[in-house]
Amino acid sequence: MEDYLKKILQAKVYEVAKETPLEKANNLSKALKNNIYLKREDLQDVFSFKIRGAFNKMRQLPQSQLANGVITSSAGNHAQGVALSALKLNCSATILMPITTPLVKVNAVRNLKAKVILFGDNYDETYKEALRLSEENNLCFIHPFDDPEVIAGQGTIAIEIEKQVKEPPEAIYVAVGGGGLIAGISLYIKNIWPQVKIIGVEPEDADAMTKSLNNSKLIELASVGQFADGVAVKKVGEKTFEIGRKYIDKMITVNTDEICAAIKDVFEDTRSILEPAGALSIAGMKKDIFESKYANKNMIAIACGANMNFERLRFIAERSALGEYKEAMFAVEIPEKAGSLINFCSLLNNRNLTEFSYRMSNSVNAQIFVGIEVNGVIDKDELLQEFRKSNYPFIDISNDELSKNHLRHMVGGRLPQKFTVLEKSKYIELLYRFEFPERPGALINFLKNMKSNWTISIFHYRNHGSDVGKIVIGVLIDRAEINYWNKFVEFLGYKYWDETNNQTYKLFLGASD
């Protein structure tokens, strides 16, 4: 480990990287009752810390290797670091990126004169193909995280933090993908301030480091979520894992809503928009402060990237309110009679509504889909207590992905009454959610693989920020063909969730009695 410390101190990064500021986030500090500081790596010329490790590695390559050119695989930010470094060092660069990479990152790499090859649905597929091309064409592979010089380059962030603070902080929060950033920072910080907590943050659906540390061995995930594409790695590096075992104090996982809320938090303090991976550390820090009840402590979060697709902002704005507990969503059943809506609204006690969907029903009860403004966790709990005291059956659907992504846009329709008792005994309506890499023809390919005698009864598709497609589909199939449906689902190879028994679906979209 001492060799790493020496490498960090000798790292060559400042020919292309800049020393980024450590800024106090005044709004966050006030809200969290701690002194919150953001290390602004989003202010690098490539809007990410990745330029440090990439350049440090390439700057130390022999001229003969540079002459042949370099190659790498990346979900985007490391790609820009390698491309800019190659431009600076006057060598060619071939960059392999997953097909799901946001266009803003792909175009940024192309603008830096690098050759871009889009390959694979995730980083791991892209990585394997890049290694193959590296050997085939005798190109030096620049690893995005599991390389001593890359780790050392990222570690220069910690040197800057040491110079920028008056006293050691309580904790430093770091986003974790492959582990290069947290490895470099922890190596340096733990050698100068062993008491400072190093806390890694991962998405709940891309928690390879968390699982590896918990099992004391490298764990490869079967699949990873793509929302925080910059950390969508199935397996962390061998070197970064060994460093993490020694120096990481704790890992925290956060969900999509919490990441969206953190993006909004940083925007309100800085007027900058971080990408999901760039805001991970802030989301984890908020969660840790709340759970650990820290007060009046100095906390640092690494704002590590800002390569955001503009198309994602609608989704982020929509979900941030849920992530910061400023909105709660409920499915409520009320009597289908005059005055019921007014009586229900009186329960809300003048709270602001964010969404309200109602459709007249031919039954004795009607279902309402309602979004209500709340002011934090405590306020939401108080609202829940009011609902429990009332006579209205309800479901809190604030954490239900089917409701948040699809049903809120679909409320109001049911299978027609002509779907008779006889038909119901023969046929069944299945409801499934699918998530697939967004690419031309992906949706058509999905539909073409379905059997022609399966009737689509529900369909909702949503582009999830240009990188992931999400659909919910209901199908009416003969009960005798359920095994064929199960085989079809497995054959597709997409991530899926069976929502047939989802309570919100039954309330709003299930068959009429």
Image (cartoon, grey):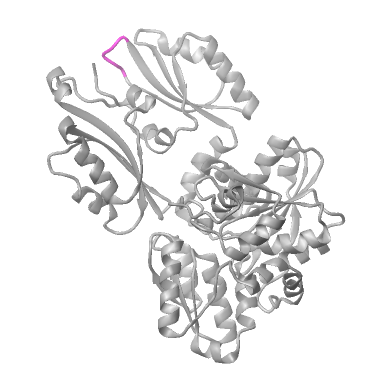
Q: Is residue 350 visible?
A: no
* In the image, residue 232 above or below residue 470: below
Left or right: residue 139 versus residue 485 is right
Q: Is residue 54 visible?
A: yes
**Range drawn in magenta:** 360-364
Q: Residue at x 35, y 8 (%)?
A: 337
* x and y, in percent, of residue 215 in the image: 58, 49
Q: How many numbered marks have been drawn onto this rendered protein structure? A: 0
Asked whether 362 falls inside the magenta stretch, the response is yes
* In the image, residue 367 above or below residue 16: above
Task: Find the residue positioned furthest to the right.
Answer: 166
Left or right: residue 424 versus residue 140 is left
Q: Quadrant of residue 21?
A: bottom right
Left or right: residue 161 versus residue 363 is right
Q: Residue at x 73, y 71 (%)?
A: 8
Q: Residue at x 63, y 65 (%)?
A: 49
Location of the C terminus (image quadrant): top left
* x and y, in percent, of residue 453 in the image: 12, 39
Location of the N terminus (image quadrant): bottom right
